Amino acid sequence: MPDVTRLPVGAASGRIAIVHLGLGAFHRAHQAIYLERYRQRSGDAAWGVSSANLRSSVGLVDALREAGHRYHVVEYANRESVTVREIGVIEEALFTGRDEHGQWGRDREALLARMASRETRIVTLTVTEKGYFLSPASGELLADAPMIAADIATPAAPRTAPGILVEALRRRRDSGLAPFTVLSCDNMPDNGQRTRTAVIQLAERGDAALAEWIAAEVAFPCSMVDRIVPAMTDADFARLSELGVEDPNAVVCEAFAQWVIEDDFPQGRPAWEADGVEMVAEVAPFETMKLRMLNGSHSLLAYLGALDGIETVFEAVSHDDLKVLLRRYMLEEAAPTLTMPEGTDLAAYAEQLLARFANDSLRHRLQQIAMDGSQKLPQRWLQGAEARLAEGEGAPCIALGVAAWIRYTAGADLGGRPLAVDDPLAGRLAALHARYGDDIPALVAAFLAVEAVFPPALAVDASFAEAVTNAYTTLTQHGLAGALISLGRA
């Protein structure tokens, strides 16, 4: 039996000042934890949270309501050291997605009213990269995406996060209220600026004056978030039952957590510095460091490991050659592209990441990380690769990763076992495999020409195309072991 620390829950207050879009496991195990710490330390109960689920099943929302919005977060330092927290800072759970009858927006009006209320001062988001409906390559709003097109046609009944923000801000402007601060907590570079772009460009489609008001009045600070929160499995719930935690809404995560935020909150914020939040003038260096080193490493493990039949991060990083690959990628291809504040030790950060990946108490599935690759790869790998090539340097680890991603999108591992390809561009990518088949140079060229993913400078770089083609050939002909051996010789 592990050593278990149990922490109590704070008292509910019914006072809500923060609305969160994206009621998933990460929000419940990250932002809500920091706010729970703040509430218990300070006694300030004014910053309760209303959390809205925009896309997934209504089940979580209803289950939280039935539990009085209480749930548990179980933090594993390792198998022998566990902290169990009960969380009560979420005061309200709402659902605006499509229900089992195909109807949209059960609680949409309640959400918009909450966001338009005088008490709401901050809106946070964890809707994943694809939830912003921005081109991964250009960063511009995907105005032709069906859900964005629906929001343009019926702005008062929005379905997307940008549409909900635009409509709520319109209501505040029309009521003479100051706008809330919009704080993105998703893994995107310049996530505040990207959120600003999505919201303003969507507003421009229907109300130029509103777009100008948003541009002039609304704060969109950037943030960097970090905590490994695997999707829950039956095995996780069984482990929790052994700890005495019987909670269908529970979340399992690692003990480590980090939150770095640009300090730009015109309507005020919790004084959460004492609770571990780093308030800074500029978050970009930390954001890019995490995206390229942590998330980039995760993606390498996800595609290469899944192709070899490996299921979890722990199993993958226990593979000595994959661990060597990660260290080489982080120190030779990611770290040289970063400009960090004085005193930042990137080699130490790399070793810390490898230790976190080796946490044997977490079953972080590689196929969870592999989701939405077309949305993730530009900021995790491709921008770094551009920087390397611009300096006349190579990026063989990234080239191997891109080759593995291309092969992964074929929908089967190297042994022929099926892989779930969960990606907004899944159909388009499958069509490329169907068209080019085993013509590897043509297949790679077709993928690199997908402008929604690959920046033009990288797409036309002959040396990068050659590196990806060679890596794909070796991977498919000689497997993971052969690809790693070949990379070691490069």
Image: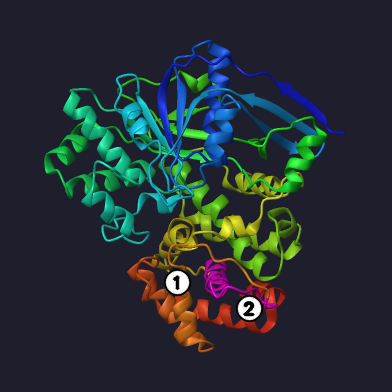
Which structural element holds mark 1? helix
Q: Does residue 38 lie above or below 99 as drawn?
A: above
What's the residue type where badge 2 is placed? Leu
In the displayed structure image, the side of residue 261 where residue 352 appears, left or right: right
Among the 4 quarters of the image, the one containing residue 5: top right
What's the residue type where badge 1 is placed? Gly
Residue at x 41% of width, y 75% of height: 448
Tell me if residue 340 can be seen.
no
Instruction: Work out whether residue 249 or residue 362 is closer to the camera in this orientation and state it.
Output: 249
In the displayed structure image, the side of residue 294 where residue 284 appears, left or right: left
Among the 4 quarters of the image, the one containing residue 262: top left
- Quarter of the image with the C terminus in it: bottom right
User: Where residue 14 sits: x, y (%)?
Assistant: 47, 16
Which structural element holds mark 2? helix
Magenta residues span 396-416
Question: As drawn, which residue projects farthest toward the top?
Answer: 43
In the displayed structure image, the side of residue 70 where residue 215 appears, left or right: left
User: Which mark's residue is nearer the viewer, 1 or 2?
Assistant: 1
Question: As drawn, which residue projects farthest toward the front?
Answer: 101
Q: Which residue is mark 2?
A: 475
How crowded pointer 2 is (Cα within 10 Å; few <14, some 14-19, many 20+) is rated as many
Question: As drawn, which residue projects farthest toward the bottom?
Answer: 439
